[in-house]
Image: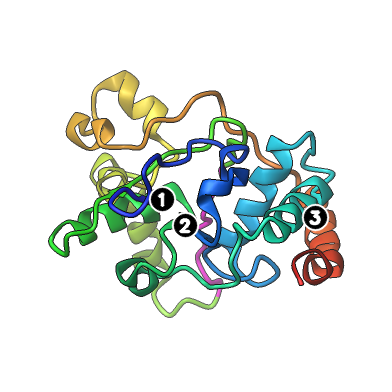
Amino acid sequence: GCDAARITTCPETFADLLKPEYKGKVALNGNPTKSGSAFGGVYAAALANKGSFGDIQPGIDYFGKLKKSGNFIPVESTPATVEKGETPISIDWDYLNAGYADQFKSKGVDWKVSVPKDGVYAQYYSQAINKDAPNPAAARLWMEYLYSAEGQNLWLKGYARPVLLPAMTADGTADKTFVAKLPAVEGTPAFPSSEELDKAKATLSENWDKAVS
């Protein structure tokens, strides 16, 4: 996400973020050792810098380099920091940034969103029914609704890419208005295995603070 009123040319890649024009302007949405969105940002940076799902270290090194250049700032990006101009470039999920763009319009902030072309990464949010749910039948009905065309289009309305979007696009049930508003993305996002995720989190926990301190 990028405040176009404060940034002359908004970045489109992780490589762009190293440019001197972005000094003191780049933030993550939280600490990647604790925040899922920030963790996704580091993982994507690893993929953009010859890393892999089994090797997140290039992403950690990238943010270390970004910190040394003065571009990366240790401020947790939030809607409030964006409005104040404290975090004019925010690395966050695309659906959150797209939602902020709508939210900021009435406040005079021109928030632009792009998915980095050199580090395309996606992650699923999972759903579950508690085995001790007091009304398990109602819980199952709720899950059925979430995965109905109506429920999936509600996710889509919030800029999240619903899991059934490919099938809904094929059968015509996806709301084309909402689809058209999604940030553009190239390529096919890939997903790490649970083993790779565990390894990445362990590496990040061990090396993050040393890299950006």
Secondary structure type for disc 1: loop
- In depth, the one of 178 and 72 nearer the eye is 72
Magenta region, residue range: 122-131
Q: Earlier in the sequence, mark 2 or mark 1?
A: 1
- In depth, the one of 42 and 163 nearer the eye is 42
Amino acid identity at mark 3: Ala
Relative to 120, is 156 on the left or the right? left
- Whether residue 123 is visible: no
Q: Position of residue 88 (x, y in %)?
A: 41, 59
Q: Position of residue 77 (x, y in %)?
A: 47, 68
- Whether residue 185 is visible: yes
- In depth, the one of 17 and 179 nearer the eye is 17
Q: Residues within 10 Å of mark 3 (few under 14, many from 20)?
A: many
Q: Residue furthest left?
A: 106
Colour theme: rainbow
Which labelled disc corresponds to residue 90?
A: 2
Report the Cα–Cα distance between label 2 and label 3. 22 Å
Secondary structure type for disc 3: helix
Report the Cα–Cα distance between label 3 and label 1. 25 Å
Report the Cα–Cα distance between label 2 and label 1. 5 Å
Secondary structure type for disc 2: strand
Amino acid identity at mark 1: Gly
The residue mark sitting in front, 3 or 1, is 1
Q: Residues within 10 Å of mark 1 (few under 14, many from 20)?
A: many
Q: Position of residue 75 (x, y in %)?
A: 54, 73
Amino acid identity at mark 2: Ser
Which residue is label 3 attached to? 200
User: Which picture quadrant has residue 83?
Assistant: bottom left
Q: Earlier in the sequence, mark 2 or mark 3?
A: 2
Which residue is label 1 attached to? 1
